[in-house]
Image: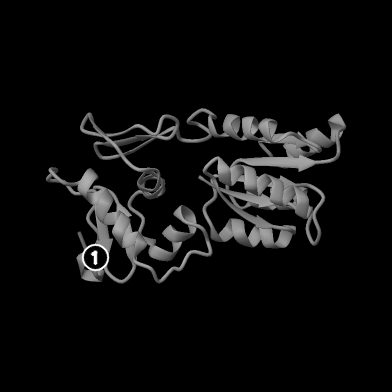
Amino acid sequence: MRILLVEDEEAITEFVKKGLSEEGYIVDTVDNGEDALNKIFDVDYDLIILDIMLPVKDGLKVCREVRENGISTPILMLTALDSTEDKVTGLNAGADDYLVKPFSFSELLARIRAILRRPPTILNLKLQVGDLVLDTVTHHVERSGKRIDLTPREYALLEFLMRHPNQVLSRTRIVEHVWNLDFYTESNIVDVYIRYLRKKIDNGFENKLIHTVHGVGYMIGEIQPNKSKGGES
């Protein structure tokens, strides 16, 4: 999963990013509210860790603007303020949880996992496209009742595709979410992993779910892309 960490204290940023990266998360970082909004509007994040005391635009303003724009990505607030009133203000701004500094990494990790286990009304736990089902908690994937074993990177790619069914996703957008942002985007790594997925997801099935849109990118869905616009299955 991809996380955005918005924190202007370098020591905290390095500490949190290192720990979350070791846990398998992809972590992007920014140190002010304005850059945070630009990232949030451009990249699909699974979670935002947002400090309140930020330069340019504070975390409360960022949180409110995110929610006003209809973005429901879970937000975990970080702050040195510990009063009940401060916590209520953060939650009323649209945050999902609140963690007071200083904090232990184990508590941060526990809160992240709790947020990502929220019921389906808040965060979809099971994704389905046709007869393909993916459980985001157990990472169990099956098609027509048959279990499909995936590597961690194959799973991350499939989950990203299934969170955007019937949407054409560019190679750049896929790389930004499934691999690190500084990954060399001219590489054919996306095409390679799409081939891996096709062998496991589509081989042996008449109805193909993973489609190529020539010159644009890839999509997953039961609906075939419009071939008159350059689509090919």
Q: Residue at x 70, y 46 (%)?
A: 15
Q: Is residue 232 visible?
A: yes
Name the foreground residue: 57 vs 173: 173
The amino acid type of the residue labelled 1 equals Gly
Q: Taking 148 as reference, is 94 left or right?
A: right
Q: Tell me the residue at 33%/64% (across/down).
A: 217
**104, above or below 153, in the image:** above
Secondary structure, mark 1, is strand
* Image coords of residue 120 (percent x, y): 48, 30
Q: Nearer the viewer, residue 32 or 196?
A: 196
The correct choice, above or below, for 6 with respect to 135 in the image is: below
Q: How is the image coloured?
A: one colour
Q: Identify the image quadrant of residue 101.
A: top right
Q: Is residue 64 visible in this depiction of the protein? A: no
Residue 5 left/right relative to 150 = right
Crowding at dot 1, Cα within 10 Å, few <14 / some 14-19 / many 20+, comes out as some
Q: Which residue corresponds to mark 1?
A: 231
Q: Identify which residue, 195 or 163, lies in the foreground.
A: 195
Q: Position of residue 90 (x, y in %)?
A: 76, 39
Residue 223: % across, % down? 24, 51
Residue at 33%, 52% (x, y): give it.
Answer: 166
Label total for image: 1
On the image, which quarter does residue 55 sit in? bottom right
Q: Residue at x 72, y 41 (%)?
A: 77
Residue 149 falls in image quadrant: top left
**Which x, y percent locates residue 233?**
20, 59
